Each structure stands twice: as C-alpha cells, then as structure tokens.
Image (cartoon, rainbow, N blue to C red):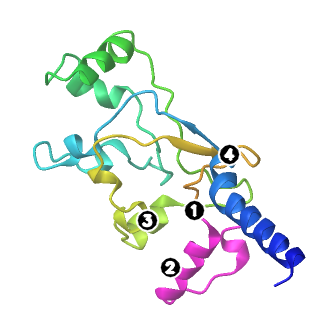
Amino acid sequence: MTRGLIIFATGFAFSAAAGWLVLPNKLYSKTQQPVQFSHEVHVGPKNSLAGDTCHSFRADGSFTGVPKMDGCTGCHAAPMGTTVAEKNFIEQYVTPGREPQWLVYSRQPDNASFSHAVHVKRAKLACEQCHSTHAKTTTLRPVELNRVSGYARDTMHMDACVACHKKNGLEHSCLDCHK
C-alpha cells in the first residue's frame, strides 16, 4: 500500500466512525420528563389499571394522548405509598392543581395522519404491537429531539407502517395517511 492510500483509508475510517458514533449523539438533545413515572406500578399486577384508564379515546374516536391531571387526582389526592417520587408529585402538581408539561416521544409530521382508534378499535391491535414493553417500564427515559427537524427519535417512520400493512395484507394509497 502506498502512503497516500494508507492516509486516505485512515481518514475515511475516522470520518465514518465519527459519523456513526458521534454525530447521532450530537444531533439529538435529551430532555427528562418533568416527573418520573412507573407504568409498571400503575398497570402491573398490584394495581391492574387498564391502559385505556389513562390513554383513552374521545367520543369522536380521537386519541386523548397524554393523560390530564384529573385522571391522577382520583387516586393521588394523598400519598398511597411511601416513595419520595409520589410525595414530590403530590406537592408539585396535585396540590397546586398544576399539569405536568409532559414531553411527547413521538409526533407525526404535519402532512401525515394517524388514527389510534382505527388501529386499536377497528384493527384490534394491542398497544404493545407498536409501543413494545413501554407498559412494563419503571422509569421514563429522556425524550430525544432532533435539533434540526424537531422530531423525536421515537417518531414512527413510514417504513414501519408500510411493513406492518403489507404483513397484514392491507393495501393503501399514499393519500390514506398523507393529506
């Protein structure tokens, strides 16, 4: 190998490694949720709340998304346990009637339309099909927002939707989801 080729290969390898290892970490900002929340405590075997207790549908079929404080205050007007996290939640949010400013892990582009009701009620998909083991988490991980686009790292990508539709024998036009 010539010296020039060695220098080029070294530079290329260094650039590729930087692109794969460094850039993604710099491209996304990480922000913690305002409150650490355990889905496992709320939907686990001890409490057995159904997922739709907090994440439900309105009468028109639209998804309510992140639950509002009034859903929490029914159980948490006073501490039910002995954790510092619950005590802080009650002091900072329940007692003053202040809504936590939850960050959204996934936001669809403005030109895309997604209906939870169609997928959950009509197609009868389990939440875990798209949201994996999120219901078993004991803490909330940081939300990772792309500094350029503003979208979260967890935003669903069209390839995943298309693959699921193909797997289930569904054919659609682009205009079914893109308006």
Under mark 2, the amino acid is: Cys
On screen, residue 141 above or below 171: above
Expressed as whole percent of the image width and height from the top left, the position of residue 155 reads 58, 56
Q: Is residue 14 left or right of residue 72?
A: right
Q: Residue furthest right?
A: 4
Task: Report the Cα–Cα distance between label 1 and label 4.
Answer: 21 Å
On screen, residue 63 above or below 169: above
> Helix, strand, or loop for circle 4?
helix
Report which residue position mark 2 lands on: 164
Name the mark on residue 156. 1
Q: Quadrant of the N terminus?
A: bottom right
> Helix, strand, or loop for circle 2?
helix
Under mark 1, the amino acid is: Met
Report which residue position mark 4 lands on: 26
Expressed as whole percent of the image width and height from the top left, the position of residue 38 reads 28, 39
Residue toward you, 25 or 75: 25
Please report contact status of discs 3 and 2: CB closer than 8 Å, yes or no.
Answer: no
> Helix, strand, or loop for circle 3?
helix
- Total marks drawn? 4
> Helix, strand, or loop for circle 1?
loop
Mark closer to the chain start, 1 or 4: 4
Q: Which segment is the magenta one? A: 157-179
Residue toward you, 105 or 71: 105
Q: Is residue 155 visible?
A: yes
Task: Report the Cα–Cα distance between label 3 and label 2.
Answer: 10 Å
Report which residue position mark 3 lands on: 130
Task: Report the Cα–Cα distance between label 2 and label 4.
Answer: 31 Å
Please report contact status of discs 3 and 1: CB closer than 8 Å, yes or no.
Answer: yes
Q: Residue furthest bottom?
A: 169
Q: Quick one: label 3, few (<14), some, or many (20+) residues within 10 Å?
A: few
